Image (cartoon, grey):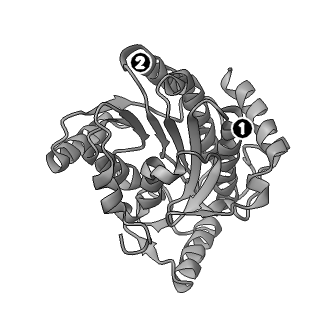
Amino acid sequence: MGKDEVNIEQLVKRSKLDGKTIIVTGANTGIGKETARELARTGARVILACRSLQRAEDARKEIVDDTKNENVVVKVLDLGSLQSVRDFAVDINANEARLDMLVNNAGVFTNESKVTQDGFEMMFGTNHLGHFLLTNMLLDKLKACTPSRIVNVSSLGHENYPLVLDDLEAKNCNRMNAYGRSKSANILFTVQLASMLEGTGVTTYSLHPGFVKTELGRDIKCLNNACCLCCLGCLWRCLQGEGMKNPLEGASTTLYCCLEPSLADVSGRYYANCKEKAAKPHATNPETAQKLWDVSLSLVGL
């Protein structure tokens, strides 16, 4: 895995997860599909949690053909619908014997102001609230299968966009601002989870996957300031040496957080390029993390 110092291919080969169950959200394309593919190589039962049943079935067939692991299944999950999240979690809790790892990978970026089925700003509602509800509803299952891990895919996009607690949804902000705030929320969620789960055997991680050619921006029409800022940011990172990654390279840090044995005793930290990295202070502030947790509980009806 050229851009990362850790040899992810060898890490996957050394990881034997037969009998374990892993959920990967947004696993029908991009980083999520490559994460699911490599986790399937470990022998684990991998659940592709996706909005599109047909695209997920296509991804499942591809992964099974490649890895020869028949224990890859598809379940419908629309993170933009709290009812869909509840239905999915009820199904998992009722019908899956165990859950050893939850990879909150799915994410959206929209250049137009959109809302979820429940009326939340689309990026905040999908990137944060959907995963917040999902994780909380599956916590008992994760606690019953320790040691277990929760991996939240965030972004370097959090760096310039602190969460504003009295304007969580950033409905009137430009789209990069709203996206960045949702990614700050991912890290704050990880920090609070780590605090609340200390001593339970469930550990949490957040990460920046790199600048990856995926379908994240499939709704972006490159005719607006938000998109231009995003493109300029990617160009700047390329010039600084990070460069664009393909989806498999982009999945490396997720896989590192899922599989690296040395991370078993750490929790709540942020990673990039398969190394621990300091997230911005606004995304790791314990007081902000607690307040976000409390508000999120109310918003999702927990």
Q: Are marks 2 and 1 in contact (CB under 8 Å)?
A: no
From the viewer's side, name the closer residue of 135 and 173.
135
Residue 82: horizontal and vertical position, in percent?
Answer: 56, 26
At a point 15% along the width and 44% down the height, the residue shown is: 68
- Say above or below: 61 vs 162: above
Instruction: From the top left corner, tell me how far across and down residue 170 is, in percent.
Output: 74, 48
Q: Is residue 156 left or right of residue 216?
A: right
**Between discs 2 and 1, the one toward the N terminus:** 2
- Answer whether residue 263 is visible to the viewer in this image: yes
Q: Nearer the viewer, residue 236 or 119?
A: 236
How far apart, in angstroms, are the residues tagged by discs 2 and 1? 28 Å
Q: Position of residue 237 (x, y in %)?
A: 56, 78
Q: Is residue 234 above or below residue 26?
A: below
Circle 1 is placed at which residue position? Answer: 195
Q: Amino acid under label 1?
A: Ser
Q: Residue furthest bottom?
A: 239
Among the 4 quarters of the image, the one containing residue 101:
top left
Between 133 and 115, the residue placed more toward the observer is 133
Q: Residues within 10 Å of mark 1 (few under 14, many from 20)?
A: some
**Left or right placement of residue 158 versus residue 292 in this view:** left
Residue at which label 2 appears? 91
| Element on which disc 2 rests | helix
Residue 21 as seen in the image, left or right of residue 41: right
